[in-house]
Amino acid sequence: MNRDRAGNGVLSRDGRRVRRHLAILAGSIVAGSTLVMVLTGGMRERLSLASAYVALALLAITLSLGPLNVLRGRSNPVSFHRRRDFGIWSAVFGLLHTGIGLTVHLRGKMWQYFLPTDDSPRLLGLRADLFGAANYAGLAAVFLLVLLSAISNDRALRSLGVSRWRGIQRWAYPLLALTVVHGALYQMMERRGAALVITFAALVVAVVGLQLARRRRGETRRSPA
């Protein structure tokens, strides 16, 4: 009987995760498709922007779930499926954005996203202008996003141990910083519209605000009465 209940519990949990994955994917496709329809420019540019904002929104949700648990007074486990699932899809759309974005400019000369041209500044053989900096930040952010998603599972947690696993997961904060740098530089270079700038800023401010609120809540709990 106990074994049957345990098996049914696992199946029920797996079923919930499948439904959540489908819901996240469906919501992301709807949001991305809406952005593609309302944005201006060529199709590649619109797909690149749409996938970028969907990835950013999913990352914002991923980084907000833990602080929201703390602020609501709920238990905040080391790792939980809801946060994992949003993080996985953030990585998927981040990779999609990278793949599309590398075809928007400099078609046929993709290396110039990172290597200097005859008229661009260079440092140690690398492109050293704002365009290069934005692309390096984006590339590093995608690497971290994929790494963090790859270890967001029970097997990696057991293999690495809680302390080491948490240490790697703290790279989520540099990931957010790199994402902000990448997005802000492109906002400046491409002089994007107010709606995109406000949306970008609102997502970033919301995540940072929740993280700071969680930290203050933690400090209040540790302080003597």
Image (cartoon, rainbow, N blue to C red):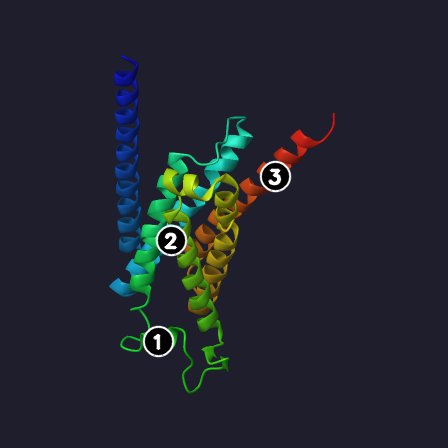
- Residue 200 placement (x, y as % from top left): 45, 53
Q: Looking at numbered disc 1 in the image, what kind of residue is underneath it?
A: Trp
- Residue 176 placement (x, y as % from top left): 49, 52
Q: Looking at numbered disc 2 in the image, what kind of residue is underneath it?
A: Val
> Reading the chain from its start, which is encountered first: label 2 or label 3?
2
Front disc: 2 or 3? 2
Task: Quadrant for the C terminus, please.
Answer: top right
Residue at 37% from the left image edge and 51% from the top image edge: 55
**Mark 2 and mark 1 in contact (Cβ < 8 Å)?**
no
- Residue 98 quadrant: bottom left
Can residue 48 be seen here? The reply is yes
Q: Gap in Å between the C-alphas at discs 3 and 1?
A: 41 Å
Residue at 50% from the left image edge and 31% from the top image edge: 76
Q: Which residue is mark 3?
A: 215
Q: How many marks?
A: 3
Q: Which residue is mark 1?
A: 111
Q: Name above or below for residue 133 compared with residue 164.
A: below
